[in-house]
Amino acid sequence: LFLFALVVGVFMWLLYNKTRHGKYMYAIGGNENAAAVAGVNVPATLIRIYTLAGALYGLAGFLLGAKAGGASTATGFGYELEAIAACTIGGVGTVPGILLGVLVFEVLKICLQYMQVNPAYTYIAQGIVIVVAVALDLRKYLAKK
């Protein structure tokens, strides 16, 4: 799974930083109306974004099913918290930061499993990490002002 994450991460970094489509994605994420005024074809770009997202969701579902040895309707339940948290910790807008955020959360989960911590407390630990990361980011933002 690490190799797949690395390949997808490199692909997304190249797409996001070295192509016109990547700049359009960033512009639409910042302000859709401003991107349209700047000349971005917003509907076509959104279709490409959602198509790419669907392909990556499909790849992730396939890999998760392969890792678990099967899949059900509840497979991946609760992963949205981890996705948002990884983006928050890594810094929104940078692919290497997001990969670092995912790595932090995976290492945290593995360590808690090895320490035989109750899985319910894993969410509490993740919440604490999110709060600390947001507090540090807020402190950094306020220090700039």
Image (tube, rainbow, N blue to C red):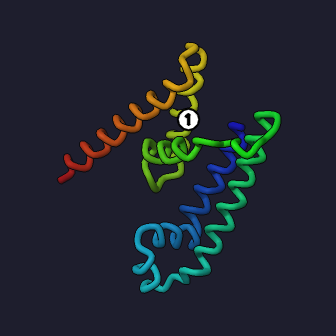
**Residue 111 seen in the current view:** no
Apparent side of residue 1 relative to residue 127 in the rendered image (left or right): right
Apparent side of residue 65 relative to residue 48 in the rendered image (left or right): right
Apparent side of residue 29 relative to residue 68 in the rendered image (left or right): left
User: In the figure, 105 relative to 14: above or below?
Assistant: above
User: In the figure, 15 relative to 128: above or below?
Assistant: below
Name the outermost residue toward the front.
Answer: 73
Name the outermost residue toward the left.
Answer: 145
- Residue at 69% across / 48% down in the picture? 7
Residue 122 position in % (x across, y down): 51, 27
Quarter holding the N terminus?
Answer: top right
Apparent side of residue 91 relative to residue 142 in the rendered image (left or right): right
**Residue 125 seen in the current view:** yes
Question: Quadrant location of residue 136?
Answer: top left
Residue 113 position in % (x across, y down): 59, 19
- Residue at 60% across / 15% down in the picture? 114
Name the one closer to the observer, 102 or 96: 102
- Residue at 42% across / 34% down in the picture? 127
Residue 90 position in % (x across, y down): 46, 44
Helix, strand or loop at label 1? It is helix
How many numbered marks appear?
1
Name the one closer to the observer, 6 or 59: 59
**Label 1 CA crowd tier, 10 Å (few <14, some 14–19, many 20+):** some
Amino acid type, callout 1: Leu
- Residue at 51% across / 43% down in the picture? 81
Report the residue marked by disc 1. Answer: 103
